[in-house]
Amino acid sequence: MTRTRRAFLKRGGAAAGIAATAGCTSVLGIETKNTVKVSSMRFTEDIILGYMALESLRENTDLTVLDETGLGGVTMNFRAVKNGEVTLYWLYSGGAWATIPPKHDRVIPDAEKLYQAVKREFERVYDLQYLNRAPFNNTYVLIADPQWVERTGVQTMSDFASYVNGGNTDFTVVMGPEFQQRSDGWPGLAKHYGFEKMRGNLNIRNVGSSLTYQIVGEGGAEVGMGFSTNPKIRKYGLKTLEDDERFFPIYNPAPLVNGEALEAMPAMRDVLNAIGPTLDTETILRLNGLVSLQGRDPQTVAREYLRSEGLI
């Protein structure tokens, strides 16, 4: 079964290689004909996903695949794919809907409807292709010291807002700088839950997003911003505050691909589409843990996972 699936993808790559050789005048330029540049954001999970794309494309197609992982944040990667500076990266549906123009004021709470809305809009507005999504939801969460939760009774984000609005601002919140600026991050959260006027009284510390779990877990702050699929939440025994009014959108990752490049190199489509649907929450938690907790190389982890699923 493994060989059959891999052989199918390989045959698609060979056929597309012939088509691409016949002429590629894409925005990527002559010097990058038949060349794919795989990018990613700078956090562990997106780097792993980037390497899954890279390794699968190398194994299942005849394309030249270059490593551009760790390029930057959402905006930098999006601009690079749109301009043809890189070919693809994994973008999260909720982040795409909330941060990429045109502006959207409404949240779509259904995962498939959100994904389809982003997919249609990207194709129509930007000529970008949004391929198959993974079902796991790596959404933002507020993480908290369990002793602070027990002491204050704050269990939900509504509780948090009431606590802050009651004048209780003598505690520390840690977060990454991007979260502090994003409309689907701290400003939007404060506005939605009604503590916007009081948030300036809180002691906010900007730290690297990967450090928030350790800082809260070791008593350096009471509350922090986290991601729901980060295994450090379990490692440090942290509490997550329930987003009881569902402010944060669903964040399913999917490969975002330059449309002109995909047209020139169609072998990418089936290969990339095969990856996302295999990734559920427990799987990505395990893979993230291998890298962020055990220090494994993300490219090796990605390659081993693909092999275990018969994708390479």
Image (cartoon, grey):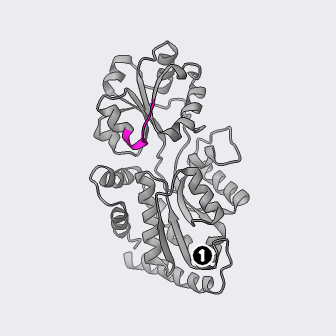
Q: Is residue 121 left or right of residue 182?
A: right
Q: Is 271 located above or below residue 218 in the figure?
A: below
Q: Residues within 10 Å of mark 1 (few under 14, many from 20)?
A: some
Residue closer to the observer: 142 or 280: 142
Res 84 quadrant in image: bottom right
Asked if residue 70 lies in the magenta stretch, the reply is: no
Residue 310 lies, in percent from the top left, at: 38, 71
Residue 221 lies, in percent from the top left, at: 36, 28
Q: Residue at x 29, y 49 (%)?
A: 293
Q: Is residue 194 left or right of residue 207?
A: right
Residue 298 lies, in percent from the top left, at: 36, 60
Q: Is residue 307 left or right of residue 205?
A: left
Q: Residue at x 34, y 34 (%)?
A: 215
Answer whether residue 268 is visible to the viewer in this image.
yes
Which contiguous range is marked in magenta?
205-211
Q: In this figure, which residue is indicated by the disc labeled 1?
A: 266
Q: Is 284 located above or below residue 211 in the figure?
A: below
Identity of the amino acid at label 1? Pro
Q: Residue at x 58, y 31 (%)?
A: 187
Secondary-structure class at tag 1: loop
Residue closer to the observer: 6 or 255: 255
Q: Is 5 located above or below residue 98 in the figure?
A: below
Q: How many marks?
A: 1
Residue closer to the observer: 171 or 16: 171
Q: Is 202 located above or below residue 5 in the figure?
A: above
* Residue at the outermost top position: 166
Residue closer to the observer: 148 or 43: 43
Answer whether residue 1 is visible to the viewer in this image.
no
